[in-house]
Image (tube, rainbow, N blue to C red):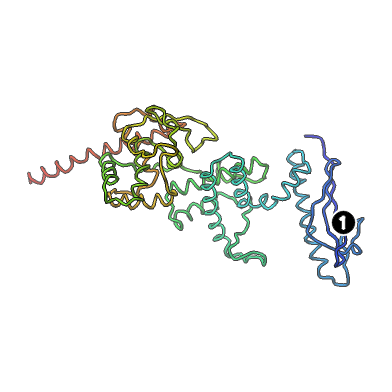
Amino acid sequence: MGKPQTTTKKVIIKDDYVKKDGTSALYICVSIDGKWDRIPLSLYWPPTHFDKNSGRLLPRFSNDPDHADYTMMIDTELSKVNEIMKEYRLGERTLTIELLWKDYNSYSSRKDFLAFMLADAHERYKRKKIERNTRDGHIASLNKLKSFWKLETGKVKAKKHEGPDQVPPLPFSSLTPKLLENFRAYMREQLGNEASTGEKSLKDIRTYVYRAIADKHVFESPFGGKGIKVTRPGSMPDALTDEQLMRLMDLFEATTTPDNWRLVLRHFLFSCFTGLRISDAKTVHHDNIKDDWLVITPHKGRTRYKKVVKIPLHPAARGLVETTLGELFATYSEQYTNRLLDKIGQAAQIDFKMTTHTARHTFGTLFIELGGDVVTLKDYMGHSKIETTMKYVHLSEKRKKEKINVFDKLVAGRAKKAS
């Protein structure tokens, strides 16, 4: 255990300045190992009715209604300081005035998992530890948890200072396996989330649970051991067949195709031939073209892995580029792009809902179906694990098995003729 620290705290009044109404500002004076600072309480009281020795307010008159309220508010702030000091002491960590300020100002997030996750997600993005898309995805998962928790606590009457849309705090101790199992069911039944989407949200929440524990928040994790398990549903991605891809190429070249459809198809088809994610298609530049290769540092995970990916640039992909300088493509937002892709898919009679991810899945699947090997594909797609790339092998095998079923019609026809 480290060296014991000397800490003191006391409520003081700054009576060297008295306002026109006869009151002065109240503070909590805190000292840690001889270094001190004042925490403003944003409360004011007459210096004539303040006991400096005890640091307590005195009633201004008999049955002073403000005296009890002010005393309660001061005690609440003192308890926050006490709690912070206790947690550092029990955690055998050294407390400084700077750390006290930081924890005091973010005290609500220390007791409320919802506030902690929101603040931590923004802090991680601010410090460039996660990408913006990652942060937004984490906050989307948080918002689902908020809506669920609000529904769970709907029977609890809101306090006077809370607005009708305010979500009650979610104490760390309330994060139990049972609560998260109910949250999983809520996403499935009330929000209509696919299993993979729901498990992604649980995975995001698990990330911040572990971060909270690492940050010395004391509570029992609802994950691991006998807790809730985050699964990886084995659903296959949707990918275009070679025939469907040709249909989209024809639609792109047709003179009757709307301009906004052509704009989306230009970078979507480029991604079908290169495997680019939409985040990379939005920023890919002429500087990324080196002879017959596309050389990029993928936007996803660039701060973590800094991996450079080299993809051979097929003539069909190069032919989709019409700019000569700067970025290769003009793009819309991902949400608007997905809405247009849905309409484009219907027009091209694609039998599933197309999204920006479809292009990358198409590249991976067709590469395997046309004789490519999984190790090379792993490098082209920038995967860190071969298991991630294997899904395209499995999808290719599944599609080959489905193709063999065309003989069912021939056999059924012969059997019918024979009868």
Q: Quadrant of residue 390?
A: top left
Q: Amino acid at mark 1?
A: Lys
Q: Is residue 209 left or right of residue 315?
A: right
* Residue 178 at x, y percent in the picture: 54, 51
* Residue 322 at x, y percent in the picture: 36, 39
Residue located beneath label 1 in the image: 14
Front residue (pair 226, 47): 47
**Image quadrant for the N terminus?**
top right
Outermost residue, bottom side: 62
- Mark 1 nearby-residue class (10 Å; few <14, some 14–19, many ≥20): some
* Residue 180 at x, y percent in the picture: 53, 51
* Residue 294 at x, y percent in the picture: 41, 31
Outermost residue, front side: 324
**78 in relation to 376, above or below:** below
Front residue (pair 266, 147): 266
Q: Is residue 46 left or right of residue 141?
A: right
